[in-house]
């Protein structure tokens, strides 16, 4: 338990606080509408559905305030810089931004469903009360005359004289009803298109439907303007429902029972969301400014395994290790932006990305680049960033374990390059004294473009007598045993036949228990940062191993898990 708290304690605390606020808002507003005197007559018409409609609305307001903040990338980068003076545990929370964004979205979806069902019941009960289905008090409340249509209780008016005033007409013509339908449809499309299978296989569908959030927020701001839910207001003389509820025939005839009057509450949703909306508008404005800045191609290289390397230059661009950028290519799409971790080091006068064929957008970009004449500039490229990630904190740990899967090696390419430059300049101001690097690939060609960097690091460390600084292990997870490079055939070779490195390629997946035990044994009193850029299944394994092999004694080895998130 103590080991779990080391890696997840603050995250769990934040989630508990978030859930506590949601629970408090739900209970508070439920009791407010279920017990408040102001809504006695409203409850008489609607029953418990009144409170079940209003309590989720309060929770929705709170979560709609939060939903945009985790996707304000520049805000998060600013906060990450501000937290540099704080502990790494605080900065680590920013790496869970997309997970929190999804969690808030699920809460919005759940509360929207409850809110919608409750209001559908409310409309039906309003209609039944107007038709005299219930008791005489309900009929009297629905039949209250109101020439100015400002003090009524039942929004379904004059059914007997105007055939249009039906529940369906109310839903599709009133501000609250029409915006409610639009909000619900937009939310359904946003959530369903965000499923993993859609995002991975049909990213464009996810991208375009996700921008329905603009319609969602516009409808949200105006949704409460209809003031459909109405409560009793004070009159002179006052109408005491305790005294008058059973004396409907005396309403307006005796001083102690004047005709009750009602009014809708002041719309409040806009006050919850206006701040995040302004922040997000500023975010998009900054993205547009960056999009308009000129980006020059320094080099375009096609690597093995259909990996495209772009070396780019942009005035005023400054980066740190492990950061990422968003790229936009108008020749493919004016609206789509895709994230890529930079593989260059801060010491270089350019920034580079390696792009693997993984969908329509990347396939089109690679096809365009392959057709360019040698030495030609590529199409216009918009660059937004750089943005911070967990990998920025690599050099804050005494010992770091870097785990890359496939193209997930890219943030670690930046880190290892930066190490090479630091040692080359003979001034390695590093707190880190040991790095373990693991790279898992399914095919041999994937190793080729990265092997040169490892060769350079290998020779540089040996020349400086620091061969123990970097320990790297390459794992080929899928292979044909009949191929001539199999380890059983070339175990006696000085260099690995796949990569040309002195470190031999391992076949199969790492035995993580063995690896963590080794790291703990070699670093008995160190704080070890474990960094992953790879699939979620591997993240779960590594997170568990970090908890398992962290020692309760603060003087002994601790493992902290960090994962790249896009």
Image (cartoon, rainbow, N blue to C red):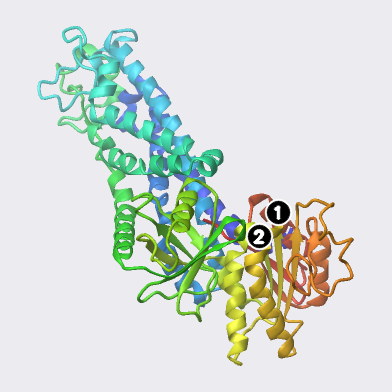
Q: Kindly state the secondary structure of the residue where label 1 is placed.
A: loop
Marker disc for residue 288:
none
**Observer-nearest of 55 and 554:** 554
Q: Quarter-wise, where is residue 330 in the image? A: bottom left
Instruction: Kindly identify the residue that appears in the image at 70 percent across and 57 percent down.
Output: 441
**Observer-nearest of 393 and 303:** 303
Instruction: Kindly identify the residue that appears in the image at 36 percent across and 49 percent down.
Output: 333
Q: From the viewer's perspective, tell me whether residue 231 is left or right of residue 393.
A: left
Binning the other alpha carbons within 10 Å of mark 2 as few (below 14), some (14 to 19) or many (20 upward) gives: many
Q: Quarter-wise, where is residue 56 in the image? A: top left
Q: Would you say residue 53 is visible in this rendering?
A: yes
Residue at the limit of the structure toward the bottom, as seen here: 426
Q: Kindly state the secondary structure of the residue where label 2 is placed.
A: helix
Instruction: Kindly identify the residue that appears in the image at 73 percent across and 62 percent down.
Output: 546
Q: Which residue is mark 1?
A: 442
- Image position of 162 with respect to 427: above or below: above
Q: Position of residue 438 (x, y in %)?
A: 72, 66
Q: Which residue is mark 2?
A: 446
Q: Position of residue 563 (x, y in %)?
A: 61, 60
Q: Position of residue 62 (x, y in %)?
A: 40, 47
Q: From the viewer's perspective, tell me whether residue 254 is left or right of residue 419.
A: left
Q: Would you say residue 404 is visible in this rendering?
A: no
Residue at the limit of the structure toward the left, as seen here: 147
The reply to whether callout 2 and callout 1 are in contact (CB within 8 Å) is yes
Instruction: Kindly identify the residue that appears in the image at 41 percent across and 26 percent down.
Output: 118
- Image position of 446 with respect to 181: above or below: below
């Amino acid at each position: 338990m103590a080991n779990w708290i080391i890696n997840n304690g603050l995250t769990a605390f934040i989630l508990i606080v978030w859930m506590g606020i949601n629970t408090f808002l739900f209970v508070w507003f439920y009791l407010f509408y279920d017990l408040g005197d102001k809504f006695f007559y409203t409850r008489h018409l609607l029953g418990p559905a009144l409170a079940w409609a209003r309590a989720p609305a309060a929770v929705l307001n709170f979560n709609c305030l939060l939903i945009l903040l985790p996707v304000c990338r520049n805000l998060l980068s600013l906060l990450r810089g501000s937290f540099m003076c704080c502990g790494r545990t605080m900065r680590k929370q920013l790496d869970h931004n997309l997970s929190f964004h999804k969690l808030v979205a699920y809460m919005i979806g759940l509360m929207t469903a409850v809110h919608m069902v409750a209001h559908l019941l409310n409309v039906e009960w309003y209609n039944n009360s107007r038709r005299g289905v219930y008791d005489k008090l309900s009929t009297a409340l629905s039949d209250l005359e109101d020439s100015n249509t400002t003090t009524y209780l039942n929004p379904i008016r004059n059914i007997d004289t105007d055939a249009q005033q039906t529940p369906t007409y109310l839903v599709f013509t009133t501000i609250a009803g029409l915006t409610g339908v639009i909000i619900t449809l937009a939310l359904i499309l946003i959530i369903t298109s965000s499923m993993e299978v859609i995002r991975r296989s049909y990213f464009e569908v996810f991208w375009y439907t996700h921008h329905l959030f603009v319609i969602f927020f516009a409808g949200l701001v105006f949704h409460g303007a209809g003031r459909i839910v109405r409560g009793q207001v004070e009159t002179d003389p006052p109408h005491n429902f305790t005294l008058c509820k059973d004396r409907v025939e005396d309403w307006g005839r005796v001083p102690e029972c004047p005709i009750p009057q009602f009014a809708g509450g002041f719309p409040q949703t806009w006050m919850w969301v206006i701040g995040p909306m302004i922040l997000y508008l500023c975010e998009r404005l900054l993205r547009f400014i960056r999009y308009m800045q000129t980006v020059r191609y320094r080099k375009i290289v096609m690597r093995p395994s259909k990996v495209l390397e772009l070396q780019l230059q942009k005035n005023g661009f400054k980066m740190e290790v492990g950061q990422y950028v968003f790229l936009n290519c108008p020749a493919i799409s004016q609206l789509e932006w895709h994230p890529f971790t930079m593989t260059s080091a801060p010491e270089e006068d350019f920034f580079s990305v390696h792009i693997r064929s993984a969908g329509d957008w990347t396939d089109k970009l690679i096809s365009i680049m392959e057709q360019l004449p040698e030495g030609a500039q590529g199409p216009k490229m918009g660059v937004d960033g750089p943005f911070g990630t967990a990998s920025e904190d690599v050099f804050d740990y005494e010992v770091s374990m870097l785990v890359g899967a496939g193209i997930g090696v890219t943030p670690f390419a930046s880190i290892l390059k930066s190490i090479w430059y630091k040692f080359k300049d003979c001034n390695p101001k590093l707190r880190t004294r040991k790095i373990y690097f693991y790279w898992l690939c399914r095919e041999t060609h994937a190793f080729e473009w990265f092997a040169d960097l490892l060769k350079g690091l290998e020779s540089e460390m040996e020349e400086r007598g620091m061969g123990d600084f970097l320990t790297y292990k390459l794992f080929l997870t899928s292979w044909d045993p009949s191929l001539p490079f199999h380890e059983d055939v070339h175990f006696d070779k000085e260099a690995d036949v796949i990569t040309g490195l002195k470190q031999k390629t391992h076949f199969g997946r790492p035995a993580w228990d063995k690896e963590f035990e080794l790291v703990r044994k070699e670093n008995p009193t160190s704080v070890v940062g474990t960094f992953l850029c790879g699939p979620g299944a591997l993240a779960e394994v590594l997170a568990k191993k970090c908890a398992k092999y962290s020692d309760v004694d603060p003087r002994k080895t601790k493992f902290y898990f960090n994962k790249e998130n896009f």
